[in-house]
Image (cartoon, rainbow, N blue to C red):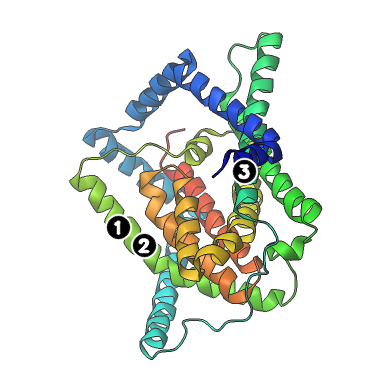
Amino acid sequence: MSWDKIRKFAGENRIYLLMLAFIIATEIFLVVSPMSEKKEKLTEKKKSHMTLSPQEVLAQEDRIKELLAHNSLLGFTVTASTFLSAVALLAGLIIGMNCIARKLNGRDIMAAYGSPPEAPWKFIDVLRVIIAFYFFVYTLQWIEADILNLMKVKNPNEVLFDVLNATLMDVIGLVIVLYFAVKKFKSGLAGLGLTVKNIARNMRIAIGGYLTIIPVLAIIMILVFIGIRVFSYEPPETKALEILYEAKGTKLLLILTALVTIIGPITEELFFRGFAYPVFRKKMGVRNAILLVSFIFAMLHMNIVSFFPILALGILLAYLYEKTGSIVPSIAVHIIHNSAVIFFVFLYKLIALPK
């Protein structure tokens, strides 16, 4: 690349390069800041608190049995959810076997109803969205820190702040993606694959797709847990689950539930599948684009235990978008999956965590 091209590139992306410099400076500050050491100590403290001795495990099992025996509604919920999970797993196995049979017979696993719209934006625009997102997120954190210092708040409600920050992050991400697609490139929501056309069919595809992936996720999780036991690895708690375990109060739980089950899936699907996938698809073809976008999607969740299940889920989400040309099935599957996870986390919180 010649110096003229470099100068031209720098001139066209001056604002984004400044944003990137700000992001790097903030990252360096967070690494060397005493706050990072405090957070690491707090994490270790939480880990040690969550590790139970064999005697504590037995005591907890007895407490759970007693709780379920005396709380008929909770006992029914556990039994019903277990039964429905088994039915979903069986249905997924049947659909999955049918998909394998179709593939072996040289037929497509799923009929194609459309294809993703051609994206008018380029790879550089995907990078611009990412840089703008992290810039506004870090700016928000600096503003919060300044406000807390001015108000002399030494011990803010950490769970509340985490929930509010996560909500604002998703809103910021959604606004940025919509700005680029709708305002800057004039593609409208249809340019991101968001349309209500054939909504009933897309919902049926979403339900069938999610049922199909359930056995795959179950097998992956079994293999992951075997690997954890073999290598004696203690995985870190994911931030979202950590907040869910600690969150108290109806309003806070409602906000958190809406964030994880609705706002988060919509934002992530519009960016990863609606905005980024068509760019990679055009550059490297369908298969490679599905794998790459799904890999990045899984990596950004930053947890080695959930990486492979999220990778499998990401492949399904991109595949559904490719086969339908609509982002609606992907959003629906994402919402169904996150809702199921939230439900079982809340159920676990009710029966297993000490009050």
The residue sitting at 55% across, 23% down in the picture is 25
Residue nearest the observer in this picture, 354 or 280: 280
According to the picture, the residue beneath numbered tag 1 turns out to be 222
Task: Residue 227: tell me if it is visible.
Answer: yes
* Label 2 vs label 3, nearer the camera: 3
According to the picture, the residue beneath numbered tag 3 turns out to be 5
According to the picture, the residue beneath numbered tag 2 turns out to be 218
Mark 1 nearby-residue class (10 Å; few <14, some 14–19, many ≥20): few
Query: Which kind of residue does numbered mark 2 sit on?
Result: Ala
Between the residue at mark 2 and the residue at mark 1, the CA separation in whole angstroms equals 6 Å
Quadrant that contains the N terminus: top right
* Label 1 vs label 3, nearer the camera: 3
The residue sitting at 64% across, 60% down in the picture is 274
Mark 3 nearby-residue class (10 Å; few <14, some 14–19, many ≥20): few
Quadrant in the rendering for residue 51: top left
Q: How many marks?
A: 3
Query: Which kind of residue does numbered mark 3 sit on?
Result: Lys
Q: Position of 302 compared to 2: left or right?
A: left
User: What is the residue that sits farthest to the bottom in this orientation?
Assistant: 105
Provide the secondary structure element on which disc 3 rests: helix
Between the residue at mark 2 and the residue at mark 3, the CA separation in whole angstroms equals 50 Å
Q: Position of 178 compared to 304: left or right?
A: right
Does 225 appear above or below 195? above
Mark 2 nearby-residue class (10 Å; few <14, some 14–19, many ≥20): few
The residue sitting at 69% across, 37% down in the picture is 11
